[in-house]
Image (spheres, rainbow, N blue to C red):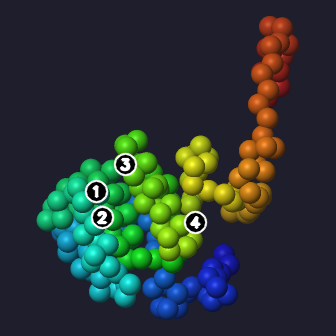
Amino acid sequence: KGEILIDGENVHENENIKQRVLNISDDWFYFSTYTVKQMAKFYADIYKNFSWERYNKLKDVFGINEKKQIRKMSKGQKKQVAFWLSLSAMPEVLILDEPLDGLDPVMRKQVLNLVIADVTDREMTVLVSSHNLRELEDICDWVGILHEGRMIMEKPLDDLKGAVHKYQLMLDEDIAEKLSENK
């Protein structure tokens, strides 16, 4: 419920804004019979800023055969293709849902470096949705926490980390049993 605004403009039915925004969901969409190259042509037809030069540079980074059907790839390879095509479209805003899920540690680092480079070089804005807060520490400087569809906290990550404390208690066995009974 509500509306999404980018630069004060509603995203719904706004093709100019949609040209500037890309989303990589946890269940990224692709045409089931398409190869990477065919999907890249589709992206190039839709996104006016799609860069074939960038696409070819990222082809070397990801090392995936562009003639292979996407549906025949592993979950991690599909996620890599999603980043490959999305970053080639040169978005101003990149929305990521569980962005590193399915990627091995080496590729996680590589993808993060690519995203961070775009944030630095092109001032791309990145919105990340994840259940893994540790994963976000390396890439986020501002965090909002949603619970039951409502924002319950929003602050700089450093402030959030400074407000979290871990306590460990040692209790007598009788007290521990009583506490566990009174959940």
Q: CA distance from mark 1 to mark 2?
A: 6 Å
Q: CA distance from mark 1 to mark 4?
A: 23 Å
Q: Is residue 8 left or right of residue 110?
A: right
How would you rate the neighbour count of disc 4 (Cα within 10 Å): few for under 14, some for 14-19, many for 20 or more? few
Mark in the foreground, 3 or 2? 2
Q: Quadrant of the N terminus?
A: bottom right
* Marks 1 and 3, the one that precedes in the sequence: 1
Mark in the foreground, 3 or 4? 3
Q: Amino acid at mark 4?
A: Leu
Tell me the number on the disc at residue 8.
none
Residue picked out by circle 2: 58
Residue picked out by circle 1: 62
Q: Residue at x 52, y 87 (%)?
A: 17
Q: Is residue 69 left or right of residue 134?
A: left
Residue picked out by circle 3: 107
Q: CA distance from mark 3 to mark 2?
A: 13 Å
Q: Residue at x 64, y 85 (%)?
A: 7
The picture places residue 30, in percent across and down from the top left corner, at: 30, 69
The picture places residue 158, in percent across and down from the top left corner, at: 74, 50
Is residue 30 at least partly visible in the picture? no
* Marks 3 and 4, the one that precedes in the sequence: 3
Q: Amino acid at mark 3?
A: Met
Residue picked out by circle 4: 127
The picture places residue 6, in percent across and down from the top left corner, at: 62, 82
Is residue 77 at least partly visible in the picture? yes
